[in-house]
Image (tube, rainbow, N blue to C red):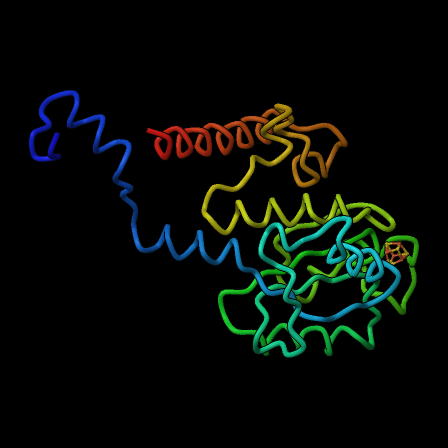
Amino acid sequence: MLRGDLEGEALEEHVKERIITTTLDTALNWARANAVFPATFGLACCAIEMMSMVASRYDIARFGSEAFRASPRQADLLVLSGRVSIKMAPVVRRIYDQMLEPKWVISMGACSSSGGMFSNYAVVQGADKFMPVDVHVPGCPPRPEAVLYGFNKLQRQIVGDPDLGWRQRYNAAGTEEWARMETGVPTPEALAAARRVVAREEKVEQEAGE
Ligand code: SF4
């Protein structure tokens, strides 16, 4: 039968099966998320786990990101793989600034996310104090699987469909630090404000899904 002969339900079925509609933005984001080029850059012990992520056992090539670039100008992902000393912070920031937009950052391990065990004057207590961080991966060091999991989260963020935050998933609105700063327990106002935020986010998600 010629395609022009199809009508009604058969035609609808044919269109559903054979035609993909999308927007340029969606196509671009899909391509970006599946061809992220990380910068070849390690900070401390976590970097060893980051390197093993590229090897055959974990194989980040499955997600299109095995090509670590030696120049920040060719990279769009910076993995902060270790503690950032105060001396190193301006260097890290410069590398980040040299990368072209759009670019992303994964903070890998306890040290780069919060200073970890190095609670002292020589180490920055969290890299997000001097640069934007998209995903934090906990652990000391995080296993390569954990970093890959964080990387998958970043990919979902890039395609515009980020995972819910844990507070939303576990109905933990109101436990934010800012909400219980004064008394140690969330005030009714803080709880109400946090629930409003959650309700708003849920509405946006619903609308996006429709
Ligand atoms: S989190 Fe642990 S493994 Fe990673 S840099 Fe810090 S001490 Fe090293």
Q: Position of residue 113 (x, y in %)?
A: 76, 54
Ligand 1: image quarter: bottom right
**In which quadrant of the rendered image does the N terminus lie?**
top left
Which of these two is toward me, 63 or 94? 63
Q: Position of residue 74 (x, y in %)?
A: 57, 75
Which of these two is toward me, 178 or 106? 106
In the image, residue 30 sits, relative to residue 127, either above or below, namely above
Judged left or right of residue 157, residue 45 is right
Which of these two is toward me, 65 or 101? 65
Q: Residue furthest front?
A: 1
Q: Position of residue 59 (x, y in %)?
A: 70, 52
Q: How many marks?
A: 0
Could you tell me which residue is drawn at 43 percent across and 54 percent down?
A: 29
Q: Residue furthest top?
A: 9
Judged left or right of residue 20, residue 11 is left
**In which quadrant of the rendered image does the C terminus lie?**
top left
Could you tell me which residue is drawn at 59 percent across and 65 percent down?
A: 37
Q: Position of residue 42 (x, y in %)?
A: 79, 68
